Amino acid sequence: MRLRNVLLVGVVFAAVVALSGNRVLSQQDEQEEKKDQKGGPNDAKMEAWMKAAQPGEHHAHLDVLIGQWNLHTKWRFGPDAPWEESTGTAEFKWVMGKRFIVQQTESPMGDQKFEGMGILVYDNTTKKHFSTWIDNMSTMLMTSEGTCDESGKVVTLYGTLTDPMTGLEKTQKSISRIINKDKHVFEMYERAPDGKEYQSLVVTYTRS
């Protein structure tokens, strides 16, 4: 009998402790919730988030790209291959409250019409530029990332893609140079089989 009474007292004591603990945790949760609502530790996180979400000086550097452009394109398929050329048009415009630039390009290439679309981004959090590109000459999504110089007028990006002709992965480097408000140039560089870098594409944009 005594043993049963002792066990019963122990069970009751454990239940009381558990209920008290749950009540304490519940009160702490309520206090934390009220703290968040009134303004507490989460204020700093929200401030950092809001700051990162606002367009800044690097977005302002890119504002000169906005508008309608005539373009002259020349490209080649190897360091010793002849250059081929074409002309076309492009439009650059801000989207999402001047946070991202969308480029749409049209250009005849031989008997075909080349169409391409890219997105240029400056990410305040990583402090990097990012670019994506799609066109009607492939089914791949090309992505690249990099940085700009101190002036914000020269952006150098690096990306990798799988070469459809060889099936091998290769690295590409691109350089965008803002010459002035009416001209900018996009250059692309690849590596030849011997490992040497060569210029494979040059697109010169002049404001229309």
Image (cartoon, rainbow, N blue to C red):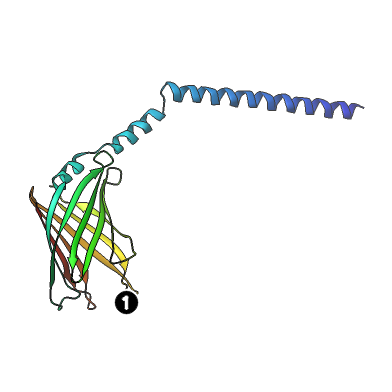
Q: What amino acid is at disc 1?
A: Thr
Question: How many numbered discs sit on the rendered protein?
Answer: 1
In the drawing, does residue 117 fall left or right of residue 82? right
Q: Quadrant of residue 123?
A: top left
The residue at which mark 1 appears reads as 166
What is the x, y in percent for residue 187? 16, 62
Residue found 41% across the figure and 25% down from its top: 40
What is the x, y in percent for residue 65? 15, 48
What is the x, y in percent for residue 136? 28, 63
Q: Quadrant of the N terminus?
A: top right
Q: Quadrant of residue 160?
A: bottom left
Closer-to-camera residue (44/137)? 137
What is the x, y in percent for residue 148? 18, 51
Closer-to-camera residue (122/141)? 141
Q: Is residue 152 visible?
A: no
Closer-to-camera residue (95/20)? 95
Q: Quadrant of residue 54?
A: top left
Q: Is residue 141 visible?
A: yes
Q: Which class describes the residues within 10 Å of circle 1: few (<14), some (14-19), or many (20+)? A: few
In the drawing, does residue 116 fall left or right of residue 43? left
Kind of element beneath mark 1: loop
Question: On screen, 91 above or below 77?
Answer: above
Closer-to-camera residue (192/89)? 89
Residue found 66% across the figure and 23% down from its top: 20
Q: Residue furthest right?
A: 1
